[in-house]
């Protein structure tokens, strides 16, 4: 508990020193974390409430987490956007309160996503500003300490005090002022042994976005528990309906939140967001300056054509998307995507692929000098055109690595075949 408190205090301190939007977001996050600890404190005093009461208890946390996400979206063109994304992508980790039976791995999933953005901060400020480096490290350390605390105290889910008082329906835990971080609640007493009908129902919480949406439902969360559709997850399902295996949430499979579609130029950045085409709908972007960039976020089943030379393109959390672009000054990156096809018509120095499955890159003679960097991805295929015949030949990128000890250091090489 002390480690969690200390690392979060360091994060708040560093955020205040950086100032600007980072400090503003840290205030929102602090409110969410304090509300989160209030629920943990409540669980140490009372018995587990009904599902309807639990939804009401968790609703304020969901609303606070939503404010963090909205703040990030509002500042997508800010120079410190990677800082905001690192925090926003991981703050749903506070939703572990409704995750069973593996809340600690759920938090780790959120930390892994955040680390993609903190790594960008580390690279950008490594030789420029030590403060930003320490800020990124403090945020990841807080998530690690939180995971450790959950694994030790709430191994299979939030522990309620089975010897405590009954929870009084309608009691608000957000009315009093939030307690200081130094007043974090102690671990609750161990639960009584439960068997048969007394066992708590497991949760099927696979998605970060779904979790945010469900936390905000309040009492509506209990509707429809008797019928669970394939794509509709609830915070808790009856024990008879739950899966026998627990799966960690995968951000690549989460549905897009209910947002208004966007397609506009914001300063020097083109924003194409929340576009969902029933067919391969086409969007054309005409770059007029090399300093412009394109950000494609949460789009499905669309085709994007980028004309003109520009700085960079980022494709984040998209599915079944086709991308055709001209010359790139910096890089093209794909993050948390599925079913992507991309084709450069000119030169592109670097293409990065992170947490993406089902990726095809079509290269012509002009783009053969590209450097490809991939991590945590599967089914990556590079198709090279035969200038004589006009046909493409497919080359699979190895997904497995072999590491051996050479005597004084480790040597890692790709395995061409599994």
Image: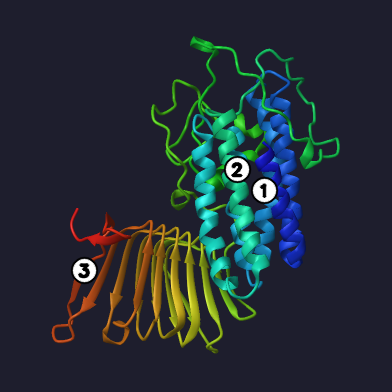
Q: Nearer the viewer, residue 257 or 43?
A: 43
For residue 50, above or below residue 249:
above
Q: At which x and y percent is residue 236?
A: 54, 29
Label 3 or label 1, whichever lies nearer to me, is 1
Tell me, for residue 7, which label it has, or none: 1
Residue placed most toward the observer, 6 or 248: 6
| Residue on which disc 3 sits | 395
Q: Residue at x 77, y 60 (%)?
A: 16
Question: Looking at the image, can residue 213 be seen?
Answer: no
* Contact, mark 1 vs mark 2 (Cβ under 8 Å): yes
Q: Residue furthest right?
A: 176
As drawn, is 64 to the left or to the right of 111? Answer: right
Could you classify mark 1 by the number of other residues whose Cα lies within 10 Å: few (under 14), some (14-19), or many (20 or more)? many
> Which mark sits nearer the N-terminus, 2 or 3?
2
Name the image quarter holding the N terminus: top right
Q: Relative to 194, is 407 on the left or the right? A: left
- Residue at the spot 48% in from the left edge and 29% down from the top edge: 227
Q: Is residue 14 left or right of residue 207?
A: right
Q: Residue 364 appears at what percent x and percent y?
A: 27, 82
Distance of label 1 from label 2 (alpha carbons)? 8 Å
Secondary structure under the numbered disc 3 in the rendered image: strand
Tag 2 and tag 3, C-beta contact below 8 Å: no
Query: Which residue is under mark 2?
Result: 145
- Please provide percent x and percent y for residue 7: 67, 48
Rendered residue at 50%/29% (across/down)? 101
Mark 1 or mark 2, which has the lower sequence index? 1
Task: Tally the numbered discs.
Answer: 3
Disc 2 crowd rating (10 Å Cα; few below 14, some 14-19, many 20+) is some
- Which of the 4 quarters of the picture holds residue 88? bottom right
Observer-side mark, 2 or 3, equals 2
Q: Earlier in the sequence, mark 3 or mark 1?
A: 1
């Amino acid at each position: 508990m002390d480690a969690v408190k200390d690392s979060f205090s360091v994060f708040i301190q560093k955020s205040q020193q950086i100032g600007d939007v980072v400090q503003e977001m840290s205030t929102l996050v602090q409110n969410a974390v304090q509300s989160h600890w209030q629920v943990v404190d409540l669980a140490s005093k009372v018995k587990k409430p009904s599902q309807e009461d639990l939804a009401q208890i968790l609703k304020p946390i969901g609303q606070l987490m939503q404010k963090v996400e909205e703040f990030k979206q509002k500042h997508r063109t800010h120079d410190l956007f990677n800082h905001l994304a690192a925090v926003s992508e991981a703050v749903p980790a506070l939703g572990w309160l409704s995750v069973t039976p593996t809340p600690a791995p759920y938090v780790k999933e959120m930390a892994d996503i955040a680390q993609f953005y903190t790594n960008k901060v580390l690279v950008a400020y490594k030789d420029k500003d030590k403060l930003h480096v320490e800020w990124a490290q403090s945020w990841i350390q807080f998530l690690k300490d939180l995971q450790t605390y959950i694994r030790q105290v709430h191994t299979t889910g939030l522990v309620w005090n089975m010897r405590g008082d009954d929870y009084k329906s309608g009691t608000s835990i957000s009315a009093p002022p939030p307690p200081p971080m130094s007043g974090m609640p102690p671990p609750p007493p161990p639960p009584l042994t439960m068997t048969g009908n007394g066992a708590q129902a497991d949760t099927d919480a696979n998605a970060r976005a779904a979790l945010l949406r469900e936390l905000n439902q309040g009492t509506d969360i209990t509707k429809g528990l008797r019928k669970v559709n394939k794509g509709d997850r609830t915070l808790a399902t009856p024990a008879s309906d739950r899966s026998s295996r627990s799966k960690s949430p995968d951000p690549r499979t989460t549905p897009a939140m209910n947002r208004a579609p966007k397609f506009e130029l914001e300063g020097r950045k083109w924003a194409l967001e929340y576009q969902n085409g029933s067919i391969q709908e086409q969007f054309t972007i005409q770059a007029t300056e090399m300093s412009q960039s394109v950000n494609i976020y949460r789009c499905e089943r669309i085709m994007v054509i980028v004309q003109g030379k520009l700085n960079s393109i980022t494709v984040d959390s998209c599915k079944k998307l086709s991308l055709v672009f001209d010359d790139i000054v910096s890089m093209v990156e794909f993050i948390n995507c599925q079913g992507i096809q991309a084709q450069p018509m000119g030169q592109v120095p670097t293409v990065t692929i992170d947490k993406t499955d089902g990726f095809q890159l079509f290269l012509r003679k002009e783009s053969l000098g590209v450097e490809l960097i991939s991590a945590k991805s599967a089914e990556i295929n590079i198709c090279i055109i035969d200038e004589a015949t006009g046909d493409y030949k497919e080359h699979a990128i190895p997904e497995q690595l072999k590491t051996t000890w050479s005597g004084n250091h480790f040597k890692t090489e790709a395995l061409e075949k599994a």
